[in-house]
Amino acid sequence: ADAIHPGYGFLAENAEFAEICQNCGLTFIGPTPDNIRIMGDKIAGRQSVIKAGVPILPGTKDNVATAEEAQKIAAEIGYPVIVKATAGGGGKGMKVVHSPASLPNQYAMARAEAQASFGNSEVYIEKFCENPRHVEVQILADNHGNVIHLGERDCSIQRRHQKLIEEAPSPA
């Protein structure tokens, strides 16, 4: 074999596995290990897309270390906000906050869930977008400059911030 396609989830998001493939002379069909690491840290991921000129929701650029800091940030960007774990995924460590009164408790819960799930309690805050469309675009590229578009899929049907259904092509 010359290449490995990791599928989705576990191995597809594992920078160490992608690096092992490279070190063994195998093509890892997916992002580079460095890109996997960047996108695995949501703060680094936000900074990366900002640098690329991609518009994003208002939010913090760093870990929000205290509930008091969270209150100040939420007041600046306006409610509702979402407190999100900087690590992991699967909808863990994410709490939507609709009012200043509920922020300290939701902030503490997000940090505790992030620590329990990922071993990292760091969180950031961004404006919560109510009733969003989650549309993903997929491309495939090679090392010779060839790029094709594989269409888009709508992933808006979710439970606890986790995709349940992917519909292609997207009706959005």
Image (tube, rainbow, N blue to C red):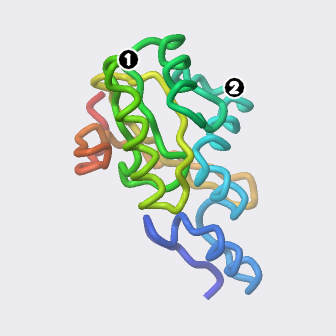
Q: Image quarter for residue 117?
A: bottom left
Kind of residue indicated by mark 1: Pro
Say whether disc 2 or disc 1 marks the residue closer to the N-terminus: 2
Circle 1 residue: 100
Residue at image x 65%, y 83%?
A: 2
Circle 2 residue: 53
Q: Residues within 10 Å of mark 2 (few under 14, many from 20)?
A: few
Left or right position of 101 against 127:
left
- Nearer to us of marks 2 and 1 is 1
- Element marked by disc 2: loop
- Element marked by disc 1: helix
Rendered position, 61 above or below 24? above
Left or right position of 136 against 139:
left
Rendered position, 41 above or below 77? below
Kind of residue indicated by mark 2: Gly
Image quarter in which the N terminus is found: bottom right
Q: Residues within 10 Å of mark 1 (few under 14, many from 20)?
A: some
**Number of numbered callouts drawn:** 2
Label 2 to label 1: alpha-carbon separation = 31 Å
